[in-house]
Image (cartoon, coloured by chain):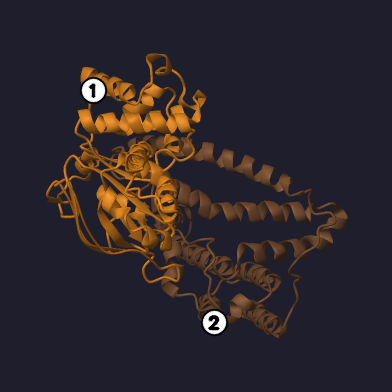
Chain colours: A orange, B brown
């Protein structure tokens, strides 16, 4: 069990007029090696929840376990927790500060006390993992394009060598090519390094394509959790709470309404295409 | 963590003090501060304290919330008090180690400075706690208007103030965010000696400056896109008017000044 959350409630500014309940009685298990997505309307508590995972926020009530350790117990080394749970914030490129890409990625592992060859190896492997070639390493991060900056920032977290990687909308503001590349790199890391990945996203298409399990947050509570395919079956309820289903589902639902005997349980365009072909072949055979 | 700083933050509730015209509150705050510097007896300070307590009570801002703002300046406060204890000369020496001399006068003077500073800060933070930044700048602009005759750029000053005030919470939030991001990368801001701590600030300061410049540029662009060209010919949506409460408040203000002079 990578992360376990028990009866967690978080209230911001408790006891002032700005008081806001961000999370209410959330229970959650994240298994080792899973690729989990979190979706929810703006203000549903997603960002608060992920800050619980590495102890950046202390819950008002409830417990957080990372690999079986209660992280808010006395004597727990927070640095150790933050090493094993890597957190990439929204627009992480705004945290870059060093003179060169290389030095910026070095910041995290240096804080963990790494030196010499081990440090070098870490930096180079994480820069390669996000697809940044050697030609960029000695450049200033501020000279790079938005997508490249984003990758430097993600490499900076990867260099901590986390077992669990959490990303808050990692593709926000990236162009389609950048999104595609970033997602395929994440998927590869998930498969080859057995990295547990937790992903916040506002794109139902991205979530449907890459994520294996899904959590839906609504007003600080978990509305749905489970297999991605199962969760997307609740189209009506998802639309009620300001979310939705992948666009391809709309087409399939519309076709079914027009009388086509097609299976609407699809997540991606490719899947829809093969279901459609199967359906059309059947009709041809029947005719 | 950093959000605990309450100086300059508007506290949105409904109270007679909140309803006052911003000009009334600005003028009274000025009167309060100036009069505070004329006070030099224990009775005088007691009077100022009671006046302030009354104003806070009427404003309905929780005392706990006001005092939270003091926490962030405790260091400056202690520094001032300690310096005054050591560097005030006087006749009644208590301790004399050659290079360090503590006198009764020094202790009294230090205590007086400390009290004055606390009264000053709590009093002026009452203004920002009960007046929204927009109201505040409207008030300042209106009060500065007579001075435009001698080429004081009243509108520009007010606009700069309102922008800076508006940016305080934004930059605080930004700092909080960057701190969290660096903490997630194993940064440690709480341990180490002064040099180490100062060095640990670099990963916060650099991104913060960059984002402040970016924001400033964006804001200038957005203002120009909406045809902002300075104050000339600009009309206002909310005209400021004095009401009954304001005259009452001025009455109290006069009483306060008289008290400060008498005591």
In this rendering, the answer to whether B256 lies above or below B66 is below
Q: Is residue B81 visible?
A: no
Could you tell me which residue is drawn at 48 percent across and 67 percent down?
A: B115
Q: Which residue is mark 2?
A: B58
Give me the chain letter of mark 1: A
Distance (Cα) linking label 1 and label 2: 60 Å
Q: In this view of the protein, which residue sits in the foreground, B77 or A49?
A: A49
Label placed on residue B76: none
**In this picture, residue B32 sits left or right of residue A86:** right
Q: Residues within 10 Å of mark 1 (few under 14, many from 20)?
A: few
Residue B171 seen in this snapshot:
yes
Q: Secondary structure at mark 1?
A: loop
Judging depth in this view, the residue of B115 and B153 nearest the camera is B153
Q: Quadrant of residue A129?
A: top left
Labels 1 and 2 in the same subunit: no
Counting from the top left corner in percent of width and height, residue B90 is at 48, 59
The outermost residue toward the top is A135
Within-10-Å neighbours for mark 2: few <14, some 14–19, many 20+? few
A100 on left or right of A7 = right
For disc 1, the marked residue is A115
Quadrant position of residue A280: top left
Residue at the extreme left of the image, as rendered: A68
Q: Position of residue B24 (x, y in %)?
A: 69, 74
Could you say which is closer to the camera, residue B126 or residue B31?
Answer: B126
């Amino acid at each position: 069990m990578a992360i376990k959350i028990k009866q967690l409630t978080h209230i911001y500014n408790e006891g002032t007029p700005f008081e806001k309940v961000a999370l209410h009685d959330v229970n959650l298990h994240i298994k080792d090696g899973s690729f989990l997505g979190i979706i929810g309307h703006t203000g549903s508590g997603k960002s608060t929840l992920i800050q619980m995972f590495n102890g950046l926020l202390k819950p008002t009530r409830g417990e957080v376990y990372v690999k079986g350790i209660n992280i808010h117990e006395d004597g727990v080394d927070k640095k150790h927790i933050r090493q094993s749970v890597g957190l990439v914030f929204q627009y992480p490129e705004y945290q870059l500060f060093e003179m060169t890409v290389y030095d910026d990625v070095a910041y995290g592992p240096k804080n963990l006390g790494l030196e010499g060859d081990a440090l070098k190896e870490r930096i180079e492997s994480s820069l390669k993992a996000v697809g940044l070639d050697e030609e960029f390493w000695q450049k200033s991060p501020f000279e790079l394009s938005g997508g490249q900056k984003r990758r430097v920032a993600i490499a900076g977290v990867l260099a901590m060598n986390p077992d669990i990687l959490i990303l808050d909308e990692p593709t926000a503001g990236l162009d389609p090519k950048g999104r595609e590349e970033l997602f395929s790199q994440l998927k590869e890391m998930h498969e080859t390094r057995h990295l547990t990945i937790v992903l916040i996203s506002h794109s139902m298409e991205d979530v449907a394509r890459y994520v294996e399990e899904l959590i839906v947050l609504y007003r600080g509570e978990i509305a749905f959790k489970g297999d991605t395919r199962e969760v997307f079956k609740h189209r009506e309820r998802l639309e009620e709470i300001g979310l939705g289903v992948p666009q391809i589902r709309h087409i399939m639902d519309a076709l079914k309404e027009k009388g086509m005997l097609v299976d609407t349980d699809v997540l991606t365009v490719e899947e829809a295409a093969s279901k459609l072909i199967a359906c059309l072949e059947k009709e041809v055979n029947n005719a | 963590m950093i959000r605990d700083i309450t100086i300059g933050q508007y506290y949105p509730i409904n109270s007679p003090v909140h309803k006052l015209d911003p000009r009334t509150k600005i003028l009274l705050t000025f009167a309060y501060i100036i009069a505070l510097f004329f006070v030099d007896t224990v009775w005088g300070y007691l009077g100022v304290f009671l006046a302030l307590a009354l104003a806070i009570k009427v404003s309905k801002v929780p005392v706990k919330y006001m005092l939270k703002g003091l926490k962030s300046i405790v260091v400056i406060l202690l520094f001032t008090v300690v310096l005054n204890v050591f560097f005030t000369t006087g006749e009644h020496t208590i301790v004399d180690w050659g290079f360090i001399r503590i006198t009764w006068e020094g202790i009294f003077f230090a205590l007086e400075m400390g009290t004055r500073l606390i009264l000053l800060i709590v009093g002026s933070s009452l203004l920002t706690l009960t007046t929204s930044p927009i109201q505040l700048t409207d008030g300042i602009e209106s009060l500065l208007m007579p001075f435009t005759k001698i080429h004081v750029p009243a509108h520009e000053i007010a606009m700069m103030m309102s922008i800076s005030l508006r940016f305080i919470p934004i930059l605080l939030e930004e700092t909080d965010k960057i701190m969290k991001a660096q903490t997630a990368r194993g940064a440690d801001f709480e341990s180490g000696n002064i040099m180490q701590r100062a060095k640990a600030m670099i990963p916060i300061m650099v991104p913060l400056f960059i984002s402040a410049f970016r924001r400033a540029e964006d804001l200038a662009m957005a203002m120009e896109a909406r045809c902002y060209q300075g104050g000339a010919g600009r009309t206002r949506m909310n005209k400021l008017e004095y009401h009954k409460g304001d005259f009452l408040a001025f009455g109290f203000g006069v009483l306060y000044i008289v008290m400060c002079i008498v005591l």
